[in-house]
Amino acid sequence: MEPLEQVIVTEEAPLVNTTLSSTSGLITDQQVKDLPLNGRSFDQLLALNVGVVNNTSNMGGGGYPGFSVAGHRTEANRFLINGVDWIGGQAAAVFITPTGASSQFLGVEAVREYNVVEHTYGAEYGKRVGGQVSIVTSSGTNQWHGNLFEYHRNSALDAKNYFEPTKGPFKRHQFGGTIGGPLKKDKLFVFGNYEGFQQRLAQSNRSIYPDVQSRQGLLPCYLAYPSTPGACPDRAAFVPVPDLKPGMLPFANAFWPVPNGPEVLVNGLPTGTAYNYNSGVQKVSENFVMTRMDYVISPKDSLFGNYTFSDGQRDSPQADTFYTMFVPLRTQSFSLQETHVISPSVVNSATLGWVRPYAASVTKPNGTGGAVPANLIFLPPGNPGQIVIGGGASTVTPASVTPAPGVNPLRDVREFYSVADDLRLTRGKHSFSAGVWVQRIHENHVGNPQFSAGGVSYSTMLTFLQDIPSSFNVIRNPVALGYRSTEGAWYFQDEMKLRSNLTVRLGLRHEMTNGWNEVTNRCANYRFDKTFVISTEPVMGHSCLEENHAKLLLQPRVGIAWDPTGR
């Protein structure tokens, strides 16, 4: 007889789980979909949990999100998507938070739920000591369903920046859709999500550039003759720079725009520099795709695969408006998991994972100041190099000249290959779990974030015009480096429900790694002799570690959950 009615019974999860010794917070599907999110970035819901602090403003000038969980550093967190590490890329090679060029956690339509385990967690969690953020994506069902969306935000209701004469432009578009359903009823399901992100945002800057007079070889007398008594009847008068190197004037005009603000004054005296006010437009674009396929092999076996792709670029104006920083970011991840019900009390899950974050960065002229002459490029045919005036202990003025920040491209890509197996067994009051996890990491690095196009520093405007540098740094033709590392762990745990209001967790986790190794033996180490004097020449080798102390990282896990009320 076929049933005529279907009854679905649901129960809300308790606000406080008194049977777990770990502290965690589950963000449900309803919270993810219904709570307002600025930029549709679902990571903002992390701050709903006790012990989670949003530190985004301290991460790269607010460009990338960061969260401190239970007092740990932001880079100590671990993000997993469907059981596999989800790792993002930044130009600074900090591959932690899985965001792209938009700095948003896109794909909110595809997130079913995620859990934030803060501390005192079980032996199944590890690799990092901070928060463990586990994200589960949506699956297809026996009915086809989907949606389309478009969100637009602009500056119409925004307040003007205090330092701007007029309100800067701001436009953000987010658009996309989802679709999911059965490829074979009750057996094979598919779900897909796409989200596009485009943003144009004005960023205000107050910079300090060489003024009009210094570009002609003139400086205030007290700066031109700082050590000559009686040389300046009028200390503020602009006079020709002694021992001027005329070849420095083209650098002053080609590397900095003419300032549009007043002279920088110190004790009422000019400094040879002037303020410049600008509102450059940051351009951000990102395309995000998340797909998932589920296959029910049998009542005891199920399989799912998940693929995530993000590709975008962030073009950020610099304080020197002749320059722009271009940062392309691309992240791909794939996971495959098979779950087998061995018996009503034994379940095994095997997982394969692959993640590939790619990041690059280059700061170069944006064309607004015209092409820099070839004879002014430090290392042709690359980008113009960096010029820093002031900023050190010998600077004459309290505010140094805004640096010209040119560098050549920096590229970094990492690939994470992982395999894991977890077994859970329930026997009476005991819930046993055991597992093993192995991850292989490949990193290929080309370039350097500083001095790849050459960098020269001058202590004052006077030494700049006289071409008396305090330092010159260059990394000539940086070679490509290939780093490799293997990490692994195994664990065993027993959760004992001794009484209805008392649960005890005992576990042991063993983590290990061989550290970073360079494929062509180009890891450099400086060694100390018996008198603790450092060697003058580095020792080149395969391992980047002098000694590996991470072979036996034993981590006992003990937890007690007790409800005194017994309710």
Image (tube, rainbow, N blue to C red):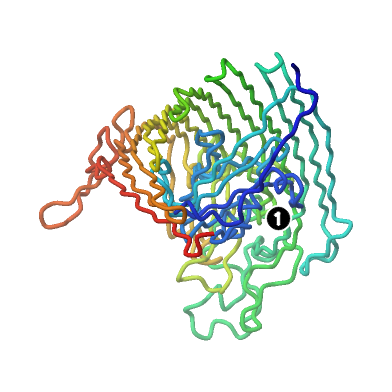
The single residue placed furthest to the right in the displayed view is 156
Front position in the image: 50 or 234: 50
The single residue placed furthest to the top in the displayed view is 184
Which quadrant of the rendered structure holds the N terminus?
top right
Residue 55, quarter of picture? bottom right
Please name the amino acid that badge 1 sits on.
Pro
Please tell me which residue is depicted at 58% across the width and 82% down the height of the picture.
Answer: 232
Front position in the image: 373 or 545: 545
Secondary structure of residue under mark 1: loop
Front position in the image: 307 or 33: 33
In this figure, which residue is indicated by the disc labeled 1?
257
Horizontal side of 351 relative to 180 (left or right) equals left
Residue 23 x, y percent position in the rendering: 50, 55
The single residue placed furthest to the left in the displayed view is 530
Residue 537 x, y percent position in the rendering: 23, 45
For the image, the number of numbered tags is 1
Which quadrant of the rendered structure holds the C terminus?
bottom right
In the figure, 441 relative to 189: above or below? Answer: below
Residue 472 x, y percent position in the rendering: 44, 52
Residue 192 x, y percent position in the rendering: 71, 26
In the figure, 102 relative to 481: above or below? Answer: below
Q: Residues within 10 Å of mark 1 (few under 14, many from 20)?
A: some
